[in-house]
Amino acid sequence: MLDSLRSRLYRLGFNLFPAYRGTGGRVTYIAPDWQEIRIKLPHSWRTRNYVGTTFGGSMYAAVDPFYMMMLLKTLGDEYVVWDKEADIRFKKPGRETLYATFRITDEEIAAIEAALAADDTDAVDRHYTVDLVDADGVVHATVRKTVYVTTDDGKKA
């Protein structure tokens, strides 16, 4: 119950935080274990560009922080996590509310921990992809993120 309340408070915090609020996006769900997050990006006067479609910057900014945050929360304080690269591919103009779902599996977390436990690895880059889709599931944009993960001190214990 406490984890559920905590995740709802994080959702509220994201939605009130000025930098995220300015994207036009809204976090609609954060799983208590931080392995799933859902957002929506309404098509409104705040997110519309000159030609009447959703501004590409709003699309990217609405999905930007989540894989990094999910890894920070699931891996714990002994890891350092940074966004390293991003790429967005626009596939169809957004003229309606768009949605994105971010997921990280237990297997992905275990793979990161195993890679960093190896004697020859100080850091890993992980690649994640998320689609911005409309209510019918039609993809309007695909964002690919590269996230850098290392141990707290960057050295083997």
Image (tube, rainbow, N blue to C red):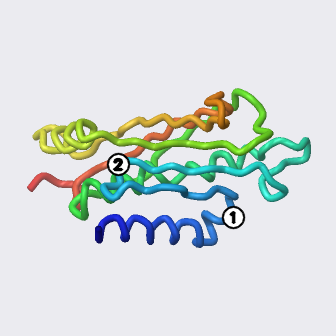
Q: Is residue 150 left or right of residue 143?
A: left
Q: Is residue 19 left or right of residue 127?
A: right
Image location (x, y in percent) of residue 108? 27, 38
Residue under numbered circle 2: 35
Q: Nearer the viewer, residue 151 or 56?
A: 56
Residue under numbered circle 1: 22
Give the quarter of the figure containing the N terminus: bottom left
Image location (x, y in percent) of residue 2? 29, 71
Q: Residue at x 12, y 39 (%)?
A: 118
Image location (x, y in percent) of residue 37? 45, 50
Image height check: is 13 above or below 50? below
Under mark 1, the amino acid is: Gly
Q: Which mark is residue 32?
A: none
Q: Which of the 4 quarters of the picture holds residue 123? A: top left
Q: CA distance from mark 1 to mark 2?
A: 25 Å
Mark 2 element type: loop
State the residue lying farthest toward the right.
51
Q: Which of the 4 quarters of the picture holds residue 73? A: bottom left
Q: Residue at x 91, y 41 (%)?
A: 51
Image height check: is 117 above or below 6? above
State the residue lying farthest toward the front.
1
- Mark 2 surroundings within 10 Å by alpha-carbon count, few (fewer than 14), some (14 through 19), many (20 or more): some
Q: Nearer the viewer, residue 138 or 85?
A: 138
Q: Nearer the viewer, mark 1 or mark 2?
A: 2
Circles 1, 2 touching at the beta carbon (< 8 Å): no
Image height check: is 88 above or below 40? above
Q: Which of the 4 quarters of the picture holds residue 116? A: top left
Q: Residue at x 64, y 56 (%)?
A: 25
Under mark 2, the amino acid is: Gln
Give the quarter of the figure containing the C terminus: bottom left
Image location (x, y in percent) of residue 64? 55, 51
